[in-house]
Image: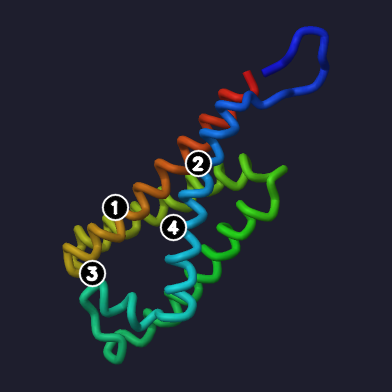
Amino acid sequence: MRQRGSNHMHVGHDSEHTAGAFWKALALIMLVNGTLGLAAPRFLIRQVGADPDAESGMIYVLRMFGIRTLFIAIDLFRLPAQREQSLREGVVVHATDAGAAFTAAMLGQLPLRPALMATSISVVNTALAVLGVRAYARGRR
């Protein structure tokens, strides 16, 4: 919120607190999922109803997504000046993940229940990123 007579932008305490709740929830989810993708891809493969030995290519893919997810989550914590931009990018990343998981479900590329669970997680992540961006934007008004 711009204060009268001031050239400095001030983020309101309520908006800052709200934005903080959203990015922290998102970062926590991403830390857990990223760590599992990187360190325990076989566990995640079994969670989607696949056999890690029969679907060994999924190990590479989950590690790739795991490290990406970890870096984004860590950036949310360590780069506060870039947090709003990270959240904006997160909207695109998580919406794309949701679309890919939903498409995999509809095309029968993954069992329906785990694919819909992955879609739901990505939809929640997208919503948290959108809400975080909106809270930051409200704080600038």
**Amino acid marked by disc 1:** Ser
Please state the horizontal and vertical placement of residue 111, each as a whole percent of the image: 18, 69
On screen, residue 30 versus residue 100, left or right, reads right
The residue pinned by badge 3 equals 109
Q: Quadrant of the N terminus?
A: top right
Please state the horizontal and vertical placement of residue 88, each as a whole percent of the image: 55, 42
Determine the CA span between mark 3 and mark 4: 25 Å
User: Mark 4: few, some, or many residues within 10 Å (few <14, many ≥20)?
Assistant: some
Which image quarter: residue 97?
bottom left
Q: Secondary structure at mark 3?
A: loop
Query: How was the colour assigned to the protein in this rendering?
Result: rainbow
Q: Nearer the viewer, mark 1 or mark 3?
A: 1
Query: Looking at the image, is 119 positioned above or below residue 51?
Result: above
Choose the circle earlier in sequence order: 2 or 4. 2
Q: Nearer the viewer, mark 1 or mark 4?
A: 4
Q: Are marks 3 and 2 in contact (CB under 8 Å)?
A: no
The residue pinned by badge 1 equals 120
Q: Secondary structure at mark 2?
A: helix
**Res 21 label:** 2
User: Mark 2: few, some, or many residues within 10 Å (few <14, many ≥20)?
Assistant: some
Please state the horizontal and vertical placement of residue 10, each as a whole percent of the image: 71, 24
Which image quarter: residue 47?
bottom left
Choose the circle earlier in sequence order: 3 or 4. 4
